[in-house]
Image: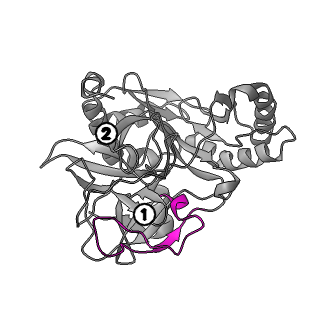
Amino acid sequence: MTAEEEAQLDLAGRMAFAERVDENLRPFLLSLDSFAGIYYEPETGDLVIRMRNRGQQVEAQIAARVPEGGRWRIQVADVSEAELVDGSSVALAAVKASRTRLDMPSVGVDTAAGSLYLPVRPDQLAAGRQVASQVADATGLAVDLRAAEPDAPAHCTLRTHCHGPTAAGIVVTNGRTCTMGFHIVAGGDREFVTSGHCSYGMFGNAYRHAALANALGAPAQWLYFQGGQDIVRVNLTAGEESDNVFNEGTDIIGMGTPAQGETLCASLGAGSNIIKCGTVTTTWVSNNFGAAWGSFDLWGGDMSYTTIGGDSGSPVYRRIPGGTGDRLRAVGVNSSVGGHFARLDQSLDNFGAVVFQ
């Protein structure tokens, strides 16, 4: 996306509004029993708040907390995003148990539609409709189809550029070439995250950056297993930690939760060497790279952009203009060439870690 296109869509304004929603409105919404999720209209950036039922008192409380600078509306929902996420694992099991075999056994959440969806190859749409019917019976949820192509991990090229302290978005290698994600603190230790598949089959290998004489560190823990996420935390040499993202010149001020339809960006390091921005197409979808990578069903969000080999682990974030300087909210790490990303708000809880800032 060009700078002119970003300006026309007011991406900076959209991200600033989403950040204020995350800080000021979402905590209140989560306290409501009737809350069913939020999403943003990709074309307009409008905030849509999904509620089980409507009430003047609650809507007045919501209105008082909606930040300035964006339009919003209430949408009555039959099913919540949380119920869709809970149902997604049941749905995936049903897909795999079906006698009708799909080349891409995967399930995603469509918050805006209030449904699950199955990514299906165009030549398998007829078979996909049969499986979707079975999934709907198993979950009691609406199930749609989306034409899609098989995804693949994003690693394999080389780029070197950074002298310490390191930054999210630079090239790291452990026998494979991937990209350094955000820096974190786990149990008092300074670490960084990258894609879990970068360490698949070589978990003991230390990560290096070509411009530095010493190794950065070895993997400490990962979630790269059945039902997990494509992310690993890696030890980091003292003094190499920072709260910066390469080519952004901005500071990271914490972690954010993605919403369907909002705008996020990624500093794509080893492969693309650019910054790409796009919209969140879903906040929860399964992805499986196939037998060569363990055949694990990995969960996370998905973006509208594509990446190339080497971009795995690249930081995915929300820009926050204003204040003392432009800042970023860390959201995830890129996982695949199709835009899949592991979510930090989910994975860091499992790690017992926080974003370094």
Q: Does the magenta stretch include residue 155?
A: no
Residue that appears at 76% across and 49% down:
93
| Horizontal relation, residue 129 to residue 302: left or right | right
Which residue in the structure is indicated by mark 1?
173
User: Is residue 8 visible in this depiction of the protein?
Assistant: yes
The image shows residue 59, relative to residue 214, as above or below, that is: above
Disc 2 from disc 1: Cα separation: 45 Å
Label 1 CA crowd tier, 10 Å (few <14, some 14–19, many 20+): many
User: Three-letter amino acid code at disc 2?
Assistant: Arg
Regarding mark 2 in the picture, which secondary structure is present there?
A: helix
User: Label 1 amino acid?
Assistant: Thr
Is 186 left, or right, of 127 in this rendering? left
At a point 25% along the width and 28% down the height, the residue shown is 3
Q: Is residue 161 above or below residue 126?
A: below
Q: Where is residue 272 in the image (x, y as percent from the top left)?
A: 38, 43
The structure residue drawn at horizontal position 54% and vertical position 56%, both measured from the top left corner, is: 230
Residue 296 got which mark? none
Q: Is the magenta stretch mostly helix, strand or loop?
A: loop
- Give the x, y percent position of residue 143: 70, 32
Q: Does the magenta stretch include residue 222?
A: yes
Nearest the eye: 18 or 353: 353
As displayed, is residue 114 above or below residue 27?
Answer: above
Marked residue nearer the N-terminal end (2 or 1): 2
Q: Mark 2 points at which residue?
A: 65
Q: Quadrant of residue 83?
A: top right
Magenta part of the protein: which range? Answer: 195-224
Q: Relative to residue 3, is residue 343 drawn left or right?
A: right
Element assignment for label 1? strand
Residue at x-position 59% and y-position 42%? 151
